Amino acid sequence: MTIKGLGKPAECKLIRFSAELEGSRIERIQIRGDFFAVPEEAFEELEERLTGTEVQNLGSRFTELVKELHIEVEGISGSGLAEVVLTALAQAGGVGVKEETHGSSI
């Protein structure tokens, strides 16, 4: 299933994404928007490393990768990204997944 979405979660800038899902697992994701991420090359690696992540774990996995890859981000958080993706998934009639509520903010 392909889903696309955009939103401006609390304490985030505009986040726009496109993702391919297999069930509730991310097969590919592209994240764009009005946020900043430095270095950009590391952010591209972060997108690649989100492959295989269950949607309900997206927020915490994003946060882990930001720290692991030493990426400085402003205007995006793991919880904000998860909110936008889960909202788009729900609107697309996707699988029922619940957003995690711990450890997903930067």
Image: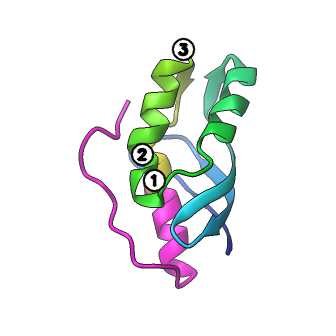
Q: Is residue 76 magenta?
A: no
- Name the residue located 53 percent from the left edge and 60 percent from the top edge: 85
Disc sitting over residue 59 in the figure: 2
**Quadrant showing the N terminus:** bottom right
Which of the marked residues, 2 or 1, is nearer the chain's N terminus?
Answer: 2
Q: Is residue 102 magenta?
A: yes
Q: How many residues crowd mark 2 within 10 Å: few (<14), some (14–19), many (20+)?
A: many
Which of the marked residues, 2 or 3, is nearer the chain's N terminus?
Answer: 2
Whole-Å distance between the Cαs marked 1 and 3?
Answer: 20 Å
**Seen from this angle, which residue lies furthest bottom?**
93
Q: How many residues crowd mark 3 within 10 Å: few (<14), some (14–19), many (20+)?
A: few
- Name the residue located 52 percent from the left edge and 51 percent from the top edge: 53
Instruction: Kindly report the secondary structure that dominates the magenta region of the rendered protein.
Output: loop
Q: Which segment did they paint magenta?
A: 83-106
Q: Amino acid at mark 1?
A: Ala
48 relative to 54, above or below: above
Q: Mark 2 and 1 residues: CB-CB less than 8 Å, in contact? A: yes
Q: Position of residue 70 (x, y in %)?
A: 54, 14
Q: Amino acid at mark 3?
A: His
Q: Is residue 42 left or right of residue 24?
A: right
User: Relative to the observer, which residue lies in front, 14 or 59?
Assistant: 59
Q: How many residues crowd mark 1 within 10 Å: few (<14), some (14–19), many (20+)?
A: many
46 relative to 53, above or below: above
Q: Is residue 105 left or right of residue 68?
A: left
**Mark 1 = which residue?**
82
Q: Secondary structure at mark 2?
A: helix
**Mark 3 = which residue?**
70
Q: Mark 2 and 3 residues: CB-CB less than 8 Å, in contact? A: no
Whether residue 71 is visible, yes or no, is: yes
Q: Amino acid at mark 2?
A: Gly
